[in-house]
Image (cartoon, helix red, strand yellow):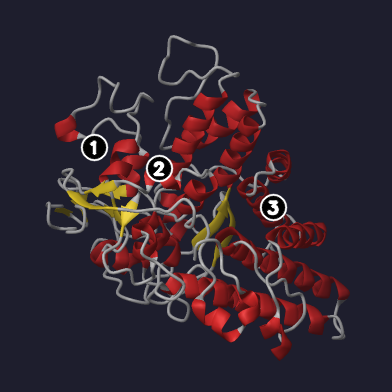
Amino acid sequence: MTACYQTLRKEGIYGGGSWATPLWEDAATPNATDYNSASGFFRIAEGIHDASNSGIINNRWAHAYEGIGRCNTYLAKVRDIPMDEGKKNQGIAEAKFLRALYYSLLINYYGDAPLILDPPVKEHNTLPRTPKDQIFAQIINDLNEAAEVLGVDATETGRATKGACYALKARQYLYHGYYAEAAAAAQQVMDLRKYSIFPDYRGLFMPENENNSEVIFDVQYLFPNYCHSFDLIRRQFDTSAPLRDLVDAYLMDDGADIATSSRYNAERYWENRDPRFRMTLVWPGSQYRGTTVTHSTFAQTGYTYKKYSIYDEDNAYNNVIKNGNQSDINYIVLRYADVLLMYAEAKTELGQIDESVYEAINAVRGRGNVRMPPIQHYDPSDVANYVAMNDQARMRELIRLERRIEFAGEGYYYMDIIRWRTAEVVMNAPIHTHNYTQKLIRRFNKDRDYLWPVPAYEIQENPALAPNNPNW
């Protein structure tokens, strides 16, 4: 069972060691950029990736199957071991949750893939790809069976729970366009009354608040044995450097955008913004680790992220230097804010915008130290924050922006622009530094890039995986 969980920390999944996989994923979106493509996300953003030149494309496939193989081995072996039946069933349920998680990564990024439910044998290396709809059905089945067994509370910190099953089910349903089912699964999480929005947005990602009320499932790290390099990457290498496009996307604290709010000052653009701006970003002129940031402190774009790093303006960690493989902040895979926004999005796509949709969004915006103006349907005079219940297009726009801001730097946004089919617009565009200097123009091929290619090495080893995805 430990091995089944351990794969979560592999480079292709949620990246431990010198990798920072979930942080780098934002570099393939309008939120951020990389400079050396250590993981391959820079190449993906440039549209110059292929089936062999990007580490993440190779590793995600390989490590997902490593996790699946370990789970399948556990499920096959544990049934014959004399042990307490309750503990046995608990382990079976956890393995099914993890198998569903690993398979979800395969179909989300690659589409069709071999569906394997038995322990690894040599003959698996000749299997063709299974249509992703069949794998999707297996994912849902695994999650439903696991949820029947797992409790609301984890048997041990970091283990799968009933809420994690429901939340992952909601995500998969939403990602694949099953909006009624997505809303129902998100409602199952809400009905548990186990989770709540953590009041401190900055503190949500600090080590002293790990496993807080908002965390549904996270990857456990602990120094010195299980570590990553998040702090080093944020503080020094800046290999997921925020772009000016993200900076300009943050609303003003009155709920209006920078183009319409009288509170916006282009010379001091960081003032009067959504409080999450200051709690997420570092910019020229701001305080960081007790000193003033200059235009060259972070040479990529002028910006870096605070999120998933211990460093801030001036706090107890300013004199702590964590180098490679020394950081151990848990990476949050599923959190309650995501569930609430998934619920709101699913209901909106169904054309069922009601009071519960407003409540879900406002719970996220109204976090204790955020307190953005609530979205309302009863005050048309408040232009910035008024959305009529029948205005699906406006609500969709609002939710998509809310997701971008709430999850900036967490690696969620890439799959959002992929599933929304907006990547062909937002990724075929120039990217800019803090002073609007253009770095380059990115490319996204709408006829190819919504799926990653199956790695060339895998097809070389198993020709039955061919043909590759369209236009690869």
Q: Nearer the viewer, residue 454 or 294?
A: 454
The quarter of the rendered structure image containing the N terminus is bottom right
Residue ID at (70%, 90%): 122
On the question of residue 10 being in view, the answer is no
For marks 3 and 2, give the one nearer the viewer: 2
Q: Nearer the viewer, residue 380 or 364?
A: 380
| Element marked by disc 3 | helix
For disc 3, the marked residue is 169
Residue 428: x percent and y percent? 35, 47
Q: Earlier in the sequence, mark 3 or mark 2?
A: 3
Residue ID at (76%, 58%): 137
For marks 1 and 2, give the one nearer the viewer: 2
Within 10 Å of disc 1 (Cα), the crowding (few <14, some 14-19, many 20+) is: many
Above-or-below relation of 406 to 86: above
Q: Residue 270, labelled with which disc?
A: 1
Q: In the image, is 211 to the left or to the right of 443?
A: right
C-alpha span from label 3 to label 2: 28 Å
Query: Given the image, on which type of amino acid does mark 2 rest?
Result: Val
Residue ID at (50%, 50%): 418
On the question of residue 187 being in view, the answer is yes
Above-or-below relation of 261 to 130: above
For marks 1 and 3, give the one nearer the viewer: 3
Residue 93: x percent and y percent? 77, 67
C-alpha span from label 1 to label 3: 38 Å
Q: Residue 425, labelled with which disc?
A: 2
Q: In the image, is 229 to the left or to the right of 302?
A: right
Q: Evaluate if marks 1 and 3 touch, with contact meaning CB atoms under 8 Å apart.
A: no
Query: Given the image, on which type of amino acid does mark 1 rest?
Result: Trp
Q: Earlier in the sequence, mark 1 or mark 3?
A: 3
| Element marked by disc 2 | helix
Q: Earlier in the sequence, mark 1 or mark 2?
A: 1
Q: Evaluate if marks 1 and 2 touch, with contact meaning CB atoms under 8 Å apart.
A: no
